[in-house]
């Protein structure tokens, strides 16, 4: 193992430690706060946290073993299972982030009707959609035998070993990244830009009200 692989292995170990600690703290907060659990964003946070913990416990150790050993870290069935989880959890995490951004947009843009627009049932439906969306691509990849150990990434993930399937596999991976990562990125940008516009508008109103109050206090001050 060269210095590059050793550094990558050390980075993976550090990332695993930080991920375990941070996500465990989030779970503790959810467990010990009934007020947080009653809110709709708790479902998105719980979905994201559990996915991150599962990735940290299952996928990252296998990737670490692949980096250290420079070969497939487990049997074919276990590697395909890990690749299925890796693809599902990656998409689910990004879609959960997009769902959280939509929730924050509704909370900021429609503060008076937020509780009516974003109920626990609505949040559960959004989480169910993220699961269905995220499961679609790994299920298709499993049916097409496009899950296994990728030598370049040293991990069990999407891969195709047949040269005649390169075009189809490229189209598949492009669609997967576009409909999972790019879509989530666009949703995040659009929602938080709307939140920023609302925040700037209210800041301007606060500045105007503050100046009017100061002028009124100056006028009322006894000379």
Image: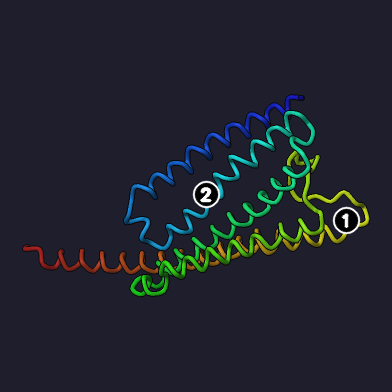
Q: Secondary structure at mark 2?
A: helix
- Horizontal and vertical percent position of residue 111: 36, 70
Looking at the rendered image, the disc whose residue lies closer to the viewer, 2 or 1, is 2
Q: Is residue 79 above or below residue 106?
A: above
> Do the numbered discs 2 and 1 sit on residues whose CB atoms are within 8 Å?
no
Which residue is at 62% across, 64% downward?
132
| Nearer to the camera, 114 or 75 | 75
Task: Using a 10 Å C-alpha cutoff, classify the residue at mark 2 as few (fewer than 14 neighbours), some (14 to 19) or many (20 or more).
Answer: some
Number of the label disc, if any, that sits on residue 93: none
Task: Using a 10 Å C-alpha cutoff, classify the residue at mark 1 as few (fewer than 14 neighbours), some (14 to 19) or many (20 or more).
Answer: few
| Nearer to the camera, 87 or 112 | 87
In screen coordinates, is 140 left or right of 55?
right
Q: The N terminus lies in which quarter of the figure?
A: top right
The residue lying furthest to the left in this view is 222
Q: Quadrant of residue 190?
A: bottom right
Which residue is at 78% across, 36% downward?
72
Q: Is residue 4 above or below residue 41?
A: above
- For mark 1, what is the residue? 166
Which residue is at 70% across, 26% downward?
6
Q: Is residue 102 above or below residue 17?
A: below
- Horizontal and vertical percent position of residue 22: 47, 41
Q: How many marks?
A: 2
- For mark 2, what is the residue? 50
- Horizontal and vertical percent position of residue 5: 73, 29
Which residue is at 66% across, 50% downward?
85
Q: The C terminus lies in which quarter of the figure?
A: bottom left
- Horizontal and vertical percent position of residue 144: 81, 58
């Amino acid at each position: 193992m060269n210095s590059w692989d050793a550094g990558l292995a050390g980075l993976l170990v550090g990332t695993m430690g930080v991920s375990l600690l941070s996500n465990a703290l989030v779970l503790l907060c959810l467990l010990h706060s009934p007020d947080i659990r009653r809110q709709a964003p708790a479902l998105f946070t719980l979905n994201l946290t559990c996915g991150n913990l599962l990735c940290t416990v299952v996928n990252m150790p296998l990737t670490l073993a692949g980096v250290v050993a420079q070969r497939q870290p487990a049997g074919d069935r276990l590697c395909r299972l890990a690749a299925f989880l890796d693809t599902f959890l990656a998409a689910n995490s990004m879609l959960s982030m997009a769902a959280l951004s939509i929730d924050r947009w509704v909370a900021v843009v429609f503060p008076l009707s937020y509780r009516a627009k974003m109920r626990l049932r609505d949040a559960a439906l959004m989480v169910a959609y993220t699961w269905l969306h995220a499961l679609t691509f790994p299920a298709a990849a499993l049916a097409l035998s496009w899950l296994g150990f990728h030598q370049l990434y040293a991990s069990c993930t999407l891969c195709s070993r047949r040269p005649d399937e390169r075009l189809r596999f490229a189209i598949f991976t492009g669609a997967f990244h576009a409909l999972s990562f790019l879509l989530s990125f666009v949703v995040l940008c659009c929602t938080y830009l709307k939140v920023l516009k609302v925040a700037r508008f209210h800041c301007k109103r606060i500045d105007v009200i503050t100046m009017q109050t100061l002028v009124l206090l100056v006028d009322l001050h006894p000379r």
